[in-house]
Amino acid sequence: MNLFDLTGETAVVLGATGVLGGAMAEGLAAAGAKVAVLGRNAERGEARVRSIQQQGGTAGFFFADALDQNLLKATREALLKRLGAPTILVNAAGGNDPRVTVTPEHPFEEIDVADWRDNFDLNLVGGALIPCQVFAPTMKNNRKGSIINIASVSAHLPLSRVAAYSAAKAAVLNLTLFLAREWAPYNVRVNSITPGFFPGEQNRRLLFNEDGTPTPRGQLIFGHTPLARFGNPAELVGAAVFLASGKASGFVTGIDLRVDGGFLSQTI
Ligand SMILES: NC(=O)c1ccc[n+]([C@@H]2O[C@H](COP(=O)([O-])OP(=O)(O)OC[C@H]3O[C@@H](n4cnc5c(N)ncnc54)[C@H](OP(=O)(O)O)[C@@H]3O)[C@@H](O)[C@H]2O)c1
C-alpha cells in the first residue's frame, strides 16, 4: 500500500493562485488527487491548472473570494459537478496587509480599526472559517475529510510589525483545535501546517529590497533559522500530502505540523 497515494480524492485548494497554495496544489495532484484551484486571479489560476495538467494531473480553476460565503457555495456546486465531492480542503488564502504593518512611522496606536478588521477577516474568516463552513458539510455527510489550515510561525509567537496577521493566525490554530474535536465523529480531520519563511508575493517587501538583497528583517530571519535559509514552497508538499492522506495520517487530527527550518525551536 502506498501511504501517500491520493488517487480517488478531490482536493480544494483555496489560495492555489498563490505561491504556497500553488505548490501544495501541484503536490496533491502529483500524488493523484483531482485538484480544484481556487482564488480570484484567473490568469494565475489557469496557469496553475495548465502546469498540473502538463504533469499528467487533473485540475480545474474556479473563481472564489474566500470572504464571500454565497459565492463560495456556488463555487462548491460547480466544482462538485466537475471534479466530484471534495475530500481534502487546504486553506491557503491569506497574508499580511501593508496597511496594518507597524513601523516607526505607523505605530500600533494609529492602526485604523477598519484596516485591522480587513486583515484579521482575511486570515481568519476567509482563511479558515468560511471555507470550513462551506466544504465541511459534504465531507461530514460522506464521513471522510481532511482539512489543512495554513497557520504561521507568527501564530505561535507574534513577529514584530504584523499584529493583526499574528492574532488572526493564532486564532486559526485555536479554531483548528476546536474543529478537530467537533468534526472527529464524522471522520473529518482538521490539522494545520505552520510554514516558516517562504518568499511569496504577500511577504516579498518585508523580506527583500528592490534589488533582491535581503532586508535587515530578512537577515534577522536567516540568523534565527537553524537551517539558515528560506523555505522552498515544494518543501510544504510532504506535510500537505501526509495530512491529506487518510492512509498516512488517519489517526492524526488537531496537530500543527511545523515546516519552518527550526525557526520555532531557536532560542539563543
Ligand atoms: N510565504 C510565507 O513565508 C508564509 C509563511 C507562513 C504562512 N504563510 C501563509 O500561507 C498562505 C499563502 O501565502 P503565500 O506566501 O503563498 O502568499 P501569496 O502568494 O500572496 O498567496 C496568497 C493567496 O491568498 C489568496 N487570497 C487573498 N485574498 C483572497 C480572497 N479574498 N479570496 C480568495 N483568495 C484570496 C490569493 O489569491 P488571489 O489573489 O487569486 O485572490 C493568493 O492565492 C497565507 O495564508 C500566508 O499567510 C505564508
Image (spheres, rainbow, N blue to C red):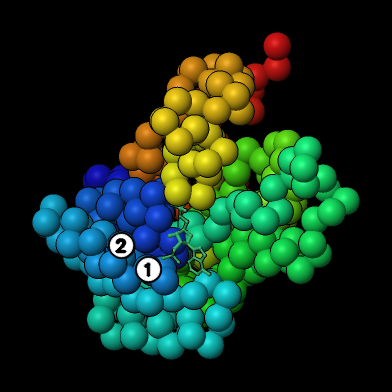
Name, please, the residue furthest toward the right.
Answer: 109
Disc 2 element? helix
Residue for badge 1: 41
Name the side, left or right, on which 176 lies relative to 244.
Answer: right
Residue at point 23% right, 61% down? 47
Amino acid at pointer 2: Arg
Q: Quadrant of the C terminus?
A: top right
Local SS, label 1: loop
Image quadrant in which you'd find residue 206: top right
Residue 6 badge = none
Whether disc 2's CB lies below 8 Å from ligand 1 is answered yes
Q: Is residue 39 above or below residue 209?
A: below
Mark 1 vs ligand 1: CB below 8 Å: yes
Residue marked by disc 2: 44
Badge 1: residue crowd in 10 Å (few <14, some 14–19, many ≥20): some
Across and down, in percent, residue 24 comes to 36, 50
Within 10 Å of disc 2 (Cα), the crowding (few <14, some 14-19, many 20+) is some
Q: Amino acid at mark 1?
A: Asn
Residue 168, image x and y in percent?
70, 55
Whether residues under marks 1 and 2 lie with C-beta atoms below 8 angstroms apart, the answer is yes
